[in-house]
Image (cartoon, coloured by chain):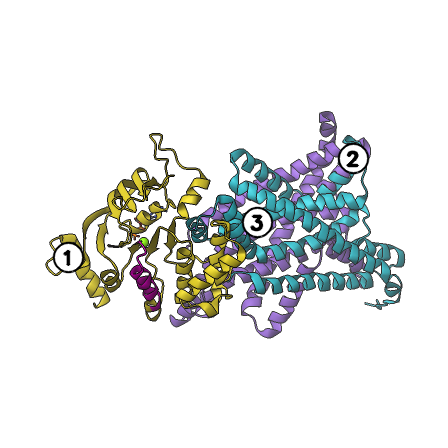
């Protein structure tokens, strides 16, 4: 093959990767946080709302889930500011996009979780005289969260990986850092090996943490 | 919702109740009364509508026709001519007056034994935390589970879970307790501990409507047995009469014969 | 806005075909290889299981974009000179294989152990146990995620525009560069992707129903 791995240049520019990784994590945490609020609110509205509301929520979910994330990123960053007279930084724009994207996936996770709450538990809540709102807060949501935990973990890790798409609008996260080193040092193999390692370690660390939560809280079914 | 607590009105009065699931006519005109302090047990073949009747009593299942009143107050529909369904708030308030224990326990899996009991006490009865806890601990003691207060349902045996289920229901101080085959999901050796709790409640004068396949328990605990099959009550009377060998009701006799054969009674 | 879309269509059509072509190749190749490797992962000897496990976990642990860049920029250094089209298809396929392996494993593991035992008890050899007993039951569990994955493949293929492959998104970008109306064009592009994927998901639901006759 004749290609000799040499990591010296990678280590010299490692701060680019490190700060990139931190930014990737920040993007993920912010978007997942906002996405959870959107997802939870819409899931509750979906299960308790009327037909029109349901159709609107379903439309949001279907549109987002059937369009590539990269296209949504372009749409929000380049498209929206041309009609509405404002500008936002590429980072803000990406957080907006990934939050909306996360929201659509999380509605589905939460909704499926709410559907999976055993009827008997809701009956038991009724039987002790809880109102519908009290049943939602004290029975359905806590049970749903525990049922949905495994699916939530997978979605969170997947959203963390999706932050790499931010590189296409020059948000200096990990993948962007990798490309920068790629084009400036040409230690291509090395940089992608290191970046692969960083994504793997971080992603699996998140997953292991969440799995520990699951073992603690998930309801064995 | 004025309660007419005169001693003559039955605590529970079910009149001409009909209920269908789609094309299945499950309750075909049920009339039943339970007096204050009385224990009534429903027996009968599976699929006969026993569970459905119990669920109608606290309106977990809306019924199509007839009326159900507890302490003179119409349960699911407004007592006036409109027969409009009560608001969810009213329903919740009414349901707090009936306790229910389920075949599959239905304990809240994310709450400890203690919290399963205090949830209704604090949120529905409006007790303070300390007061609710005292009361819950009292009932946990009554069902013999003081030491399991902080366990999650998944850490309890079936018999223990069901005893928490009973404590959760009676701690609300309901006017009537509904028990639906509360031992049929339990291993045989755990049935006794649960029935003992129910017997002691009966001895204290708790009004109960139970569905059970434990003939011995039905005989010992109840003042009256109701035999229900295919959506109607076809025999009713004191245990001695219902279980007597020269029972005239053909259907009841064959049910009991098949039943005791299967259970080697 | 409408005339701009009319102007754009001739640019977008070839891109749309490329997107469909890439998705088809990716799905077809990855399904075949993924099923073989998935069965290897479940029934193979440790020497086979571990490499497959490692491959699948690593590939599924990194963003597709990183994998695509790795293949596109990295492989030429090993002396393998790929056109961007080939590099794109290779990257997407590797990613999809890792997913298909997991679908297969998940599907096989939902078939109760007793089924294999019962098949052994009547004396069937492995390949007959697999084809006549396990596979027909596993198909039902394999299909839903696999069908979902077809939509994923179409969506994932939009990333190859970054490698200079002339797919649908690439076409959209080209028109945006000429007309300076990003909003209209991106919305139109989103609509095209949506129609494609929505049609796919309706078709998959129909297919799922056909296979839902096997009950637990
Ligand atoms: N939610 C329901 N939907 C449709 N049919 C039901 C439902 N609940 C009960 N049934 C039917 O009603 C009949 C009576 O059921 P149930 O009240 O559970 O009888 P039992 O408790 O005496 O065994 C059965 O035929 C059952 O299939
Ligand atoms: Mg029943």
Q: Position of residue A11 (x, y in %)?
A: 86, 65
Residue A5 visible within the image: yes
| Secondary structure of the residue carrying numbered label 3 | helix
Overall secondary structure of the magenta section: helix
Which residue is under mark 1? B241
**Residue positioned 17% across, 54% down in the render:** B252
Q: Which chain is purple?
A: C
Q: Earlier in the sequence, mark 3 or mark 2?
A: 2
Magenta span covers which residues? Answer: B193-207
| Disc 3: residue Cβ within 8 A of ligand 1's nearest atom | no
Q: Quadrant of the N terminus of chain B?
A: top left
- Is residue B198 in the magenta section? yes
**Residue A81 badge:** 2
Q: Residues within 10 Å of mark 3 (few under 14, many from 20)?
A: many
3 or 2: mark nearer the eye: 3
Which residue is under mark 3? A110
- Chain under disc 1: B
């Amino acid at each position: 093959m004749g290609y000799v791995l040499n990591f010296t240049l990678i280590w010299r520019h490692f701060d680019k990767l490190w700060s990139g990784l931190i930014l990737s994590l920040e993007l993920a945490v912010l978007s997942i946080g906002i996405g959870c609020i959107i997802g939870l609110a819409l899931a509750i509205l979906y299960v308790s709302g009327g037909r029109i509301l349901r159709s609107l929520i379903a439309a949001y979910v279907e549109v987002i889930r059937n369009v590539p994330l990269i296209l949504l990123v372009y749409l929000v960053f380049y498209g929206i500011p041309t009609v509405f007279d404002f500008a936002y930084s590429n980072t803000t724009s990406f957080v907006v996009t990934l939050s909306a994207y996360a929201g659509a996936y999380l509605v589905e996770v939460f909704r499926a979780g709410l559907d999976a709450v055993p009827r008997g538990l809701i009956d038991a809540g009724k039987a002790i005289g809880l109102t519908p709102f009290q049943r939602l807060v004290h029975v359905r949501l806590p049970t749903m969260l525990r049922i949905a935990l495994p699916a939530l973990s997978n979605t969170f890790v997947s959203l963390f990986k999706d932050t790499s798409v931010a590189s296409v609008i020059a948000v200096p996260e990990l993948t962007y850092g990798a490309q920068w080193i790629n084009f400036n040092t040409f230690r291509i193999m090395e940089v992608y090996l290191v970046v692969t390692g960083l994504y793997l370690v971080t992603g699996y660390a998140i997953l292991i943490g969440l799995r520990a939560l699951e073992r603690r809280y998930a309801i064995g079914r | 919702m004025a309660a007419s607590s005169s001693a003559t009105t039955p605590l529970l009065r079910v009149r001409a109740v009909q209920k269908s699931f789609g094309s299945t006519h499950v309750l075909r005109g049920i009339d039943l009364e339970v007096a204050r302090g009385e224990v009534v047990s429903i027996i009968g073949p599976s699929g006969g509508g026993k569970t459905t009747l119990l669920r109608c009593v606290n309106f977990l299942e809306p019924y199509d026709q007839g009326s159900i009143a507890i302490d003179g107050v119409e349960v699911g529909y407004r007592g006036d001519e409109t027969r409009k369904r009560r608001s969810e708030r009213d329903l919740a308030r009414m349901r707090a007056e009936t306790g229910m224990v389920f075949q599959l326990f239905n304990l809240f899996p994310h709450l400890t034994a203690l919290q399963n009991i205090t949830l209704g006490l604090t949120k529905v009865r409006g007790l303070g935390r300390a007061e609710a806890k005292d009361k819950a601990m009292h009932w946990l003691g009554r069902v013999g589970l003081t030491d399991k207060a902080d366990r999650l349902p998944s850490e309890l045996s079936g018999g223990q879970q069901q005893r928490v289920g009973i404590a959760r229901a009676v701690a609300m101080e309901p006017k009537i307790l509904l028990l639906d085959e509360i031992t049929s999901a339990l291993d045989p050796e755990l049935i006794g501990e649960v029935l003992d709790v129910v017997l002691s409640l009966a001895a204290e004068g708790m009004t109960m409507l139970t569905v059970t396949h434990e003939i011995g328990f039905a005989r010992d605990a109840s003042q009256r047995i109701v035999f229900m099959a295919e959506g109607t009550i076809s025999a009713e009377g004191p245990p001695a009469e219902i279980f007597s060998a020269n029972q005239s009701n053909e259907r009841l006799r064959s049910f009991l014969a098949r039943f005791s054969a299967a259970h080697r009674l | 806005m409408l005339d701009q879309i009319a102007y754009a269509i001739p640019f977008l059509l070839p891109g749309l075909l490329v997107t469909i072509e890439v998705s088809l190749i990716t799905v077809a190749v990855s399904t075949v290889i993924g099923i073989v490797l998935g069965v290897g992962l479940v029934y193979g000897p440790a020497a086979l299981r571990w490499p497959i496990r490692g491959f699948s976990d690593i590939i599924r642990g990194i963003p597709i974009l990183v994998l695509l860049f790795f293949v596109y920029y990295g492989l030429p250094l090993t002396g393998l000179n790929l056109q961007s089209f080939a590099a794109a298809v290779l990257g997407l396929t590797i990613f999809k294989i890792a997913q298909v392996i997991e679908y297969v494993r998940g599907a096989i593991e939902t078939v109760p152990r007793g089924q294999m035992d019962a098949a052994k008890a009547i004396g069937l050899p492995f390949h007959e146990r697999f084809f006549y007993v396990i596979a027909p039951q596993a198909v039902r569990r394999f299909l839903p995620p696999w069908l979902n994955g077809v939509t994923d493949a179409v969506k994932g293929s939009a990333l190859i525009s970054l490698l200079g492959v002339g797919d649908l998104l690439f076409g959209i970008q080209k028109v945006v560069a000429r007309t300076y109306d990003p909003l209209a064009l991106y919305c139109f592009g989103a609509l095209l992707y949506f129609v494609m994927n929505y049609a796919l998901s309706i078709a998959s639901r129909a297919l799922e129903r056909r296979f839902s006759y096997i009950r637990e």
